[in-house]
Amino acid sequence: MRPSAIRLLNILVPVKRCIDYTVKIRVNPQQTGVDTNVKHSMNPFDEIAVEEAVRLRESLKDKVESIKVLTIGPPKAIDTLRTALAIGADSGIHVEVSESAPSPEPLGVAKAIHAVIEKQKGIGGIDLVIMGKQAIDDDAGQTGQILAGLLNWPQATFASKIVLNADKAEANVTREIDGGLQELKCKLPLVVTTDLRLNEPRYASLPNIMKAKKKPIEKLSASDLGIDLTLRLETLRVTEPPKRIGGNKVANVDELLSKLKEAGVVVA
């Protein structure tokens, strides 16, 4: 009897185009959101996810068959995919929305990723989803958990270390919790969300940036996936926090107490 062939792993990394973390955020004049006519780049947590996928392939070598990156966004989001491809991913999937469309909510994004994974079943399937724990624009931190629920897959969130055993189709994931660290042993397929301490992403080299331009990117729409990205929540108004007023220096404790009593902070 011939031994069964070893199942090669396919990794999917969803990435998001966000306002660059170095940009000073400003509310737009209409107070409907923030000014988006600024520099954009890949969400830093997603960049960590791409780096981890590439490192897993470097450690497991030929046991990882493919690394695919996925983004949901306007036409300019293809630049985010190219960045991920330059880091080391093999191919991309772009679920395109119009430039004027609002950014999809976590539920819509999770449904889109779920639909893409279902679509991949006929061509090898997906064994591991690695994604950022949150995006730095909305800070929702919900998409990975919702996706795991839709797929009925195990999840390991806020990962600071991933050890993958391809032969046993399982992963040991160390995750950050309030009390310290927690280690989980999970069976594949699996959804993992990355924390900052997982790794430090590499810089893409010029040759890899040039190679990324030739790597395939599949374009899809929400209708192709049979999903609706209509927002369920309405943002009524966005305002900047009140400006801080400078404090005063006091000469001694007695003066400090006097000032606090005047402000009503301390009862006499």
Image (tube, grey):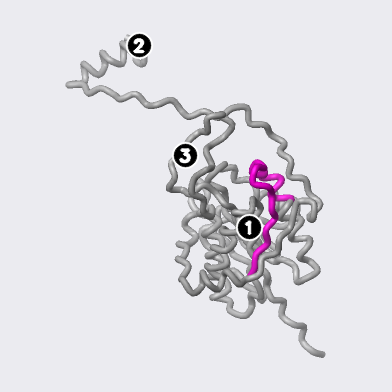
Residue 60: name its quadrant: bottom right
Q: Which residue is mark 1?
A: 14
Indicate the position of residue 4 as horizontal and vertical percent values.
77, 83
Q: CA distance from mark 1 to mark 3?
A: 24 Å
Q: Which mark is residue 25?
A: 3
Can you see residue 186? no
Name of the residue lying farthest toward the left: 251
83 over 139 or under it: above or below: below
Residue 91: name its quadrant: bottom right
Under mark 1, the amino acid is Pro
Q: Residues within 10 Å of mark 2 (few under 14, many from 20)?
A: few
What span is colored magenta in the figure?
A: 91-111
Q: CA distance from mark 2 to mark 3?
A: 39 Å
Q: Which residue is mark 2?
A: 267
Under mark 2, the amino acid is Val
Asked whether the residues under the numbered discs 2 and 1 touch, taking CB atoms below 8 Å apart as contact, a structural biologist would say no
Residue nearer the viewer, 122 or 86: 86
Q: The C terminus appears in which quarter of the rendering?
A: top left
Earlier sequence position, callout 2 versus callout 3: 3
Residue 103 lies in the magenta-colored region: yes
Residue 245: name its quadrant: top left
Left-right relation of 195 to 5: left
Q: Secondary structure at mark 3?
A: loop
Asked whether the residues under the numbered discs 1 and 3 touch, taking CB atoms below 8 Å apart as contact, a structural biologist would say no
Indicate the position of residue 19 as horizontal and vertical percent values.
51, 47
Left-right relation of 173 to 5: left
